[in-house]
Image (cartoon, rainbow, N blue to C red):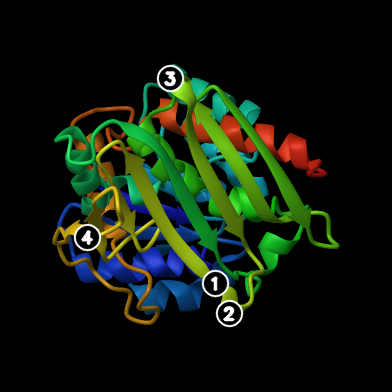
Amino acid sequence: MNIGICGAGTIASWISDILGQLNHENIVKYGVAGISAESCKPFAEKYGWQKIFDSYEELMCDPAVDVVYIAVPNQLHMDLCLMALEHGKNVVVEKPFAVNDKQANAMIEKAKEKGVFLSEALWPAFLPSRHIVDHIIKDGKIGTLTGAKIVSKANVMFMDRVKKLETGGGSLLDMGPYILSRMTSHFGTGYESVEGHFEKLETGVDSRDYYTVTYPGGIKIECVSTIDTPEEEREEYCEIMGTEGSIYMNSVSNPDYLEIRNPDGTVREVPGLPPLIVNSEVPFVKGYEHEWMGFEKAIREGKTQAGDAPWEQTLTISKIMTELRAQAGVVFPFE
């Protein structure tokens, strides 16, 4: 599977490093396109991409490209995705899949029309830890699910794009896919309502989001995400509650520590987690190999969706973020 990557920024470099370490014979770093061929040259040389294209369209026209990976700013996701699909390419879109649910629907409908693979790079959904948590729930170790708290108080202000309306910035689109991927992976897509309150930057994007997603039976998922929390106040965890205990994770997206807790909060069990490939330069970045092995398997088997990140989940996440952004009064100039 030859990958053609659109974009040569931060996430593209993280993925490239881990794929290089994975060294999977069927996952090939084939070609890259960006703002210009010249701008992509250092990236291609550093991470071992074989070919540099003069434009995104040239990449998509190359018959050797099996899957187009879109890793550009949020406002460009839909246009490049539709372009790749028109060329009959399989496509992986970095999170957030789209800036609103209307775009997400258009992208998926085009994939259906063309009969090709399309997936959001919902990295947490493919990780071994996700399946371990699923098995704990399925085995009834915490009883019947009653709710969850999902908290990601982070600071990603070093990335200029998250601060701007014109690039589809804000906490909802940057942190929301992680939180809502965790939620929908374990609680499903059949939510009833969502309600929140928000704080904004001077630029107009949401910087701190506090919202509750309600499921049938009164199950409530309390969510917090931020992009500007001071270092000393940063906090991240997920706790899934049940009638007979809870599951605690020390990270929303990629936990390296799990606890099964009794109803009184004492620790009953600490499940082991398998090792992941760690980024050579950014040690907290790890595990991207699992989504790409999932993409390769699905494409090889002729599927149009990834089993761990189906279209229904992607559409639900996009719908929730669109509803919340409307409540926050955040409107992008290109919508």
- Judged left or right of residue 303, residue 106 is right
Q: Which mark is residue 231?
A: 2
Q: Please, what secondary structure does the residue beneath circle 1 have? A: loop
What amino acid does circle 2 point to? Answer: Glu
Q: Mark 4 and mark 3: span between their CA atoms?
A: 46 Å
Q: Are marks 4 and 2 in contact (CB under 8 Å)?
A: no
Q: Which residue is mark 3?
A: 112
Residue at image position (84%, 60%) is 203
Q: CA distance from mark 1 to mark 3?
A: 41 Å
Tell me the kind of residue under disc 4. Val
Q: N-terminal of the two: label 1 or label 3? A: 3
In the image, 152 versus 319, the foreground residue is: 152
Label 2 crowding class (10 Å Cα cut-off): few <14, some 14-19, many 20+? Answer: few
319 and 292: which one is in front?
319
Q: Dot 4 lies on which element?
A: strand
Residue 31 coordinates in the image, percent (x, y): 40, 59
Q: Which mark is residue 328?
A: none
Q: Which residue is mark 4?
A: 267
Percent coordinates x, y for residue 254 in the rendering: 34, 59
Secondary structure under tag 2 reads helix
Q: Nearer the viewer, mark 4 or mark 2?
A: 4
For label 1, the residue is 234
Check the image and name the residue furthest to the right. 202
Expressed as whole percent of the image width and height from the top left, the position of residue 211 reads: 62, 43
Residue 299 vs 58, above or below: the answer is above
Q: Earlier in the sequence, mark 2 or mark 3?
A: 3
